[in-house]
Image (spheres, rainbow, N blue to C red):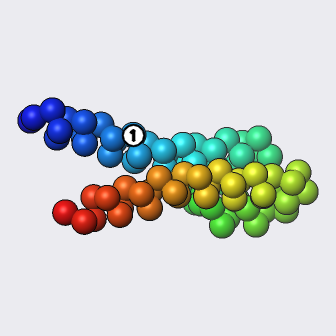
Amino acid sequence: MNLGEYIEFHIENYIIRSRAVYDRVLIFTNNLCDIGMSKEYINHNAIITNQKVINYNLKPKLVSVNKVCGAYRIERNGFWGDR
């Protein structure tokens, strides 16, 4: 592996992990709001449409975090999809 491939590997790994950050935020929100949803069923739509999340005004914050993390995914797919 040359230096360019090494750097590329770590950049892609960083971008992939950014998506995992949002998944962890959803799990945290599930626990924080005591929603009680099983981890395998937690997803963006299930959490942001939950009434507790809406009542605590967390929906706009979650949408914002998702948008930032999604930008990294789009960047990754655009860059590595051009190969």
**Residue holding disc 1:** 14
Between 76 and 26, which is closer to the camera in this rendering? 76
Query: Which residue appears farthest toward the right when viewing the image?
Result: 55
Q: Position of residue 79 (x, y in %)?
A: 31, 58
Report the residue at 53% width, 58% height from top.
70
Between 76 and 43, which is closer to the camera in this rendering? 76
| Left or right, residue 77 beside residue 65 | left
Report the residue at 80% width, 46% height from top.
33
Q: Position of residue 77 (x, y in %)?
A: 35, 62
| Left or right, residue 4 beside residue 17 | left
| Left or right, residue 79 beside residue 75 | left
- Residue type marked 1: Tyr
Q: Position of residue 51 (x, y in %)?
A: 85, 62
Q: Quadrant of residue 78?
A: bottom left
| Left or right, residue 61 beside residue 68 | right
Q: Position of residue 67 (x, y in %)?
A: 61, 58
Report the residue at 88% width, 51% height from top.
56
* Residue 11 in sight in this render: yes
Q: Mark 1, residues whose alpha carbon is within 10 Å: few (<14), some, or many (≥20)?
A: some
Quadrant containing the C terminus is bottom left
